[in-house]
């Protein structure tokens, strides 16, 4: 017999009709969904991608109002668990408990079932804790950019069209320039992550997510790699890791974190949290084979010169 459940009440009634008290345990089938990695993936997918967009105040308002029901909707409809996978998870468990039937669940039923489970447990508090960390991140990096160089920028200046041109230009620490070139994973020589004074360098073509993946592999912690970071050849390796994820995977709480790109002997740094631009610049000049360091303001595509090559070359360390 094929049974399609269309509501939570229908599932509860089915268990009662079969004199089965397994219903509360049955809900725990998807307990694994409410882990830290999935909360992070939800916020990164839904709110972090466009934080530097000029409409970020609208995104900020949506983030403030986000609740766990939106997370459940994301799980059922847009995450890697959608496309029938969650229905199959529940169906398999139910077939084991009450056999001789085939079961399926509508999206609406799954949302109601999982949402009810989430509110009955501690997951709302866990969700709100994760949300708070992303609200803090958003405030620092999008709404209240302490490294905003727009006031220092001369709009009459000609845009810099390549990292090579930026490397060759005769400028000084504190000078700002408008740039008109790409520095994403397809365009840069390599990427790096700064964590509390340590630089974790990537290889050509790697994303920041892949840098973290390799870091864990090199330190015999492969079992800690988040599912969405596990990559095959040609895979770009998931989305940009959040500060919270970097801290957890590297094993440092309240860490100073920055992301960077190296192109044509120039390091472009994105300050994320805590660390001063001068500290990151000095570390880059000591550890990387580069000529200059600049901070990047994403909203306006402006860079600010940070370090003097003569002070921090490897020969002087």
Image (cartoon, rainbow, N blue to C red):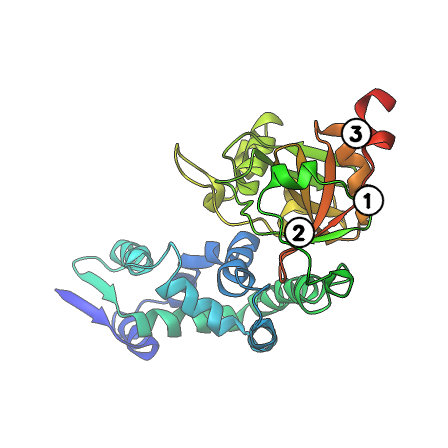
Q: What distance separates the C-alpha of mark 3 from that of mark 2?
A: 23 Å
Q: Nearer the observer, disc 3 or disc 2?
A: 3
Vertically, is 218 above or below 193? above
User: Which residue corresponds to mark 2?
Assistant: 243
Depth check: give the residue in front, 291 or 249. 291
Left or right of 26 on screen, residue 92: left
User: Which residue corresponds to mark 1?
Assistant: 172
Circle on res. 187: none
**Residue 41 in view here:** yes
Q: Quadrant of residue 53?
A: bottom right
Instruction: Give the structural element (helix, strand or loop) at label 1.
Output: loop
Vertically, is 180 above or below 130? above
Vertically, is 70 above or below 294? below
Depth check: give the residue in front, 294 or 132. 294
Label 2, residues with CA under 10 Å away: few <14, some 14-19, many ≥20: many
Mark 3 vs mark 1: which is more N-terminal? 1
Mark 3 vs mark 2: which is more N-terminal? 2
* Residue at left offset 59%, top offset 32%: 202
Q: What distance separates the C-alpha of mark 1 from that of mark 2?
A: 30 Å
User: Which residue corresponds to mark 3?
Assistant: 286
* Residue at left offset 16%, top offset 58%: 100
């Amino acid at each position: 017999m094929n049974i399609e459940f269309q509501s939570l009440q229908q599932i509860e009634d089915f268990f009662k009709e079969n004199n089965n008290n397994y219903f509360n345990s049955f809900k725990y089938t998807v307990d694994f969904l409410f882990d830290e990695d999935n909360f992070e993936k939800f916020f990164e997918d839904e709110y972090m991608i466009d934080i530097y967009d000029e409409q970020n105040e609208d995104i900020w308002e949506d983030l403030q109002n986000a609740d766990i029901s939106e997370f459940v909707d994301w799980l059922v409809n847009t995450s890697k668990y959608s496309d029938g996978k969650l229905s199959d998870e529940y169906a398999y468990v139910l077939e084991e408990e009450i056999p001789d039937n085939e079961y399926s669940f509508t999206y609406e039923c799954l949302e109601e079932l999982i949402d009810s489970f989430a509110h009955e447990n501690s997951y709302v508090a866990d969700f709100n804790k994760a949300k708070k960390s992303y609200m803090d991140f958003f405030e620092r990096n999008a709404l209240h950019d302490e490294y905003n160089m727009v006031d220092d920028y001369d709009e009459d200046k000609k845009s810099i069209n390549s990292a090579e041109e930026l490397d060759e230009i005769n400028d000084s620490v504190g000078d700002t320039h408008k740039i008109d070139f790409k520095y994403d994973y397809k365009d840069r020589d390599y990427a790096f992550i700064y964590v509390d004074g340590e630089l974790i360098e990537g290889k050509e073509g790697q994303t920041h997510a892949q840098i973290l993946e390799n870091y864990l592999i090199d330190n015999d912690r492969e079992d800690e790699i988040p599912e969405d970071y596990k990559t095959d050849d040609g895979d770009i390796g998931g989305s940009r890791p959040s500060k919270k994820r970097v801290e957890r995977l590297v094993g440092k709480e309240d860490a100073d974190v920055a992301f960077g790109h190296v192109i044509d002997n120039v390091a472009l740094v994105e300050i994320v949290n805590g660390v001063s631009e001068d500290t990151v610049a000095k570390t880059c000049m000591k550890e990387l084979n580069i000529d200059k360091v600049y901070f990047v303001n994403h909203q306006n595509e402006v860079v600010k010169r940070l370090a003097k090559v003569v002070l921090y070359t490897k020969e002087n360390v």
